[in-house]
Image (spheres, grey):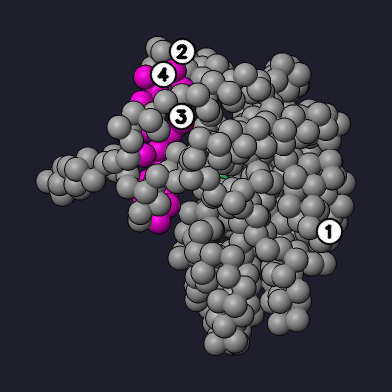
Amino acid sequence: MEQRWSARLAERKAQHLYRRCRVADSPQGPRMLIDGKPLLAFCSNDYLGLAGDERIAKALKQGVDRWGSGSGAAHLVNGHSLAHQALEDELADWLGRERVLLFSTGYMANLGIITGLLERGDQLFEDRLNHASLIDAGLLGNARLHRYRHSDMQSLRRQLAAFPEGMRMVASDGVFSMDGDIALLGEMASICSSEQVLLMVDDAHGLGVLGRDGRGCVDEAGLTQSDVPVLMGTLGKAFGVAGAFVAGSELLIETLIQQARSYIYTTAMPAALAEAARASLRIVREERWRRDKLEALMWRFREGAETIGLSLMPSRTPIQPILLGEPEKAVTWSRRLEELGFLVTAIRPPTVPTGQARLRVTLSAAHEESQVDSLLQALSAIQEEQAA
Ligand SMILES: *Cc1c(COP(=O)(O)O)cnc(C)c1O
């Protein structure tokens, strides 16, 4: 076994696909101390700049004072507190849905939803570029998994026509995590409704950022619970905390409580964390300036990047990847950026398709315009030296 591990690691290194963890010695934010070095970071999912927010930290501390450190049990045993209940109710109210169910992470929510709802003989259809947790859920579950071409509604229609048996479900990222583009939700909803297929949207990157009061891409597309019956969201990205949830009908939630194994067989998130997420939700709803600022920074970055001739993707979200191609090139650019004081991680296969390695630049409401400008200057300098 150990020989095999060594061989696999050596292969990865040779292909420039080796990954390692950097160690931060500062809270999440634009200015970070990483492996002892001060860097300006453009790679988190802390889109609204809330991960280091003092009010949320205070709610977490008060939560610990009231509830202690751990929930001590699964939700269905005695780990489900008033704080968890209040968070579920407040999220449901915000999203205009009947009910919400908390999960400990987004990965677990996706596993629980898909394996909990689909049975042998059912069919699951997923966008090829869906997040790994949705793909893994499809591979682990009992339904047959079909992957359609990215945002290609003809491809989806063809697959639906070819596989009419059993109960059927379409699951898609709302905002694609590595590309930043938004799913064609209106069209997907109308296909699903006419074909009587259940539609699930994972809006990990849209909630807090898009839509009225940050209600996400489903709200922005003018769709409701009846169009998108299963809405999944996470609390570790724009919310700046941790955890996840699914929002939908009473019947959906009751079913998941009985059947989602990653809900049933795991410890409830600490109640203090639920208190922190409640504080975060209040800020997400009220502080619209964060979304406005984020959007302005996004357009500023796009304009600047286009001026210097970088290859951007069609994204109007804070995820603004620069497509570079080969993993080696992405690693080189990332390393040069770091030498110039910026942290932007190289995203390589298998996270993205072969030949599509990239720098995944992400923006946050905590960034300043001048910081975006200095990133653009650094990118321009690297572009010139690489062309030379
Ligand atoms: C991050 C992410 C998840 C996983 O959420 P965690 O809470 O980090 O486990 C699921 N889906 C998408 C689209 C994501 O980007």
Residue 29, how many percent across, how many down? 59, 21
Dot 4 falls on a residue whose secondary structure is loop
Badge 3, how many Cα within 10 Å: few under 14, some, many 20+? many
* Residues shaded magenta: 330-353
The residue closer to the viewer here, 159 or 97, is 159
Task: Say which element carries label 3.
Answer: helix
Instruction: Name the residue that disc number 3 marks.
Output: 379
* Residue 222, numbered circle: 1
Query: Ligand 1 within 8 A of label 4's CB?
Result: no
Q: How crowded is mark 1: few (under 14 residues within 10 Å), some or many (20 or more)?
A: few
Query: In terms of sequence position, does the residue under pointer 3 or pointer 4 come before the other?
Result: 4
**Label 1 close to label 3 by CB (< 8 Å):** no
Could you tell me residue 379's position as x and y percent? Answer: 46, 29
Disc on res. 38: 2
| Mark 4 → mark 1, Cα distance in angstroms | 43 Å
Q: Is residue 183 magenta?
A: no
Q: Are marks 2 and 4 in contact (CB under 8 Å)?
A: no
Number of residues whose C-alpha sits closer than 10 Å to that of mark 2, classed few (under 14), some (14–19) or many (20 or more): some
- Residue in view at x 40 percent, y 56 percent: 353
Cα–Cα span, label 1 and label 2: 43 Å
Relative horizontal placement of residue 76, taking residue 98 as reference (left or right) = left
**Quadrant of res 332:** top left
Q: How far apart are marks 3 and 4 (CA)?
A: 10 Å
Q: Which amino acid, mark 2?
A: Pro
Between marks 2 and 4, how big is the CA–CA gap? 11 Å
Is residue 134 depicted above or below 187 in this figure? above
Going by the numbered disc 3, the residue's amino acid type is Leu
Of 100 and 381, the residue lying toward us: 381
Mark 2 or mark 3, which is nearer to you?
Answer: 3
